[in-house]
Amino acid sequence: MNRPLVLLLSALLPLVAQAQVPTGNPTGTRSSTTVAPPPVAPPVQPARPQPLPSPQPRQPIKATGPAPITTTPAPALPDKVYDRNGRIVPGVKPVGPNRVFDSRTGRYYDSVPQGTGQQIKP
């Protein structure tokens, strides 16, 4: 049953492909009006750039050495750190965003903002 169907489709495939190929001249139905080229303008001489007037007179820049290094203050971190039950833990300091250091044990803990301080994550 499949064999006659395959033979039929293989015989019809070239006919379907040939039907999709255009046979005529695609530009044969267009009008034959021609467009005149635009007139050519004479070349324009480039203008010299004019210097912009300076609001201040020119003065030499005085070098005073490298720029001074300014330190930006660290953001103020809240000093209060709460344990998992909501009690203030002495000796624990915030060291960064969502991070606290317990100086008694020497361990770092993850924390979450809670009120005016940080709370150690459960």
Image (tube, grey):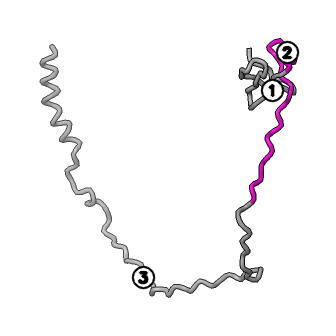
Q: Answer with the quarter of the image where residue 27 lies.
A: bottom left
Where does label 2 land, which residue?
A: 86
**What crowding class fits label 1: few (fewer than 14 Cα within 10 Å), some (14-19), or many (20 or more)?**
some
Seen at 29% across and 59% down, the residue is: 29
Q: How many marks?
A: 3
Q: CA distance from mark 2 to mark 3?
A: 86 Å
For the N terminus, the quadrant is top left
**Point 71% across, 83% down: residue:** 53
What numbered label is drawn on residue 93? 1
The residue under label 3 is 39
> In the image, which residues are magenta?
68-90
Please name the amino acid that badge 2 sits on.
Answer: Gly
Residue 14: quadrant of the picture = top left
**Residue at 73% over, 82% down:** 58
* CB atoms of marks 1 and 2 within 8 Å: no
Report if residue 109 is visible in the image: no
* Lower sequence index among marks 3 and 1: 3
| Label 2 CA crowd tier, 10 Å (few <14, some 14–19, many 20+) | few
Q: Amino acid at mark 3?
A: Pro
Side of 6 where 106 appears, left or right: right
Under circle 2, the secondary element is loop
65 lies above or below 48: above
- The mark closer to the camera, 3 or 1, is 1
Q: Return the x and y of residue 59 as percentages of the image width and height.
A: 74, 81
The residue depicted at 83 percent of the width and 19 percent of the height is 82
Q: Is residue 36 magenta?
A: no
Labelled disc at residue 80: none
* Foreground disc of the pair 1, 2: 1
Q: Position of residue 71 (x, y in %)?
A: 77, 49
Q: CA distance from mark 3 to mark 1?
A: 81 Å
Name the dominant secondary structure of the magenta segment: loop
In this view, the residue in front, 49 or 119, is 119
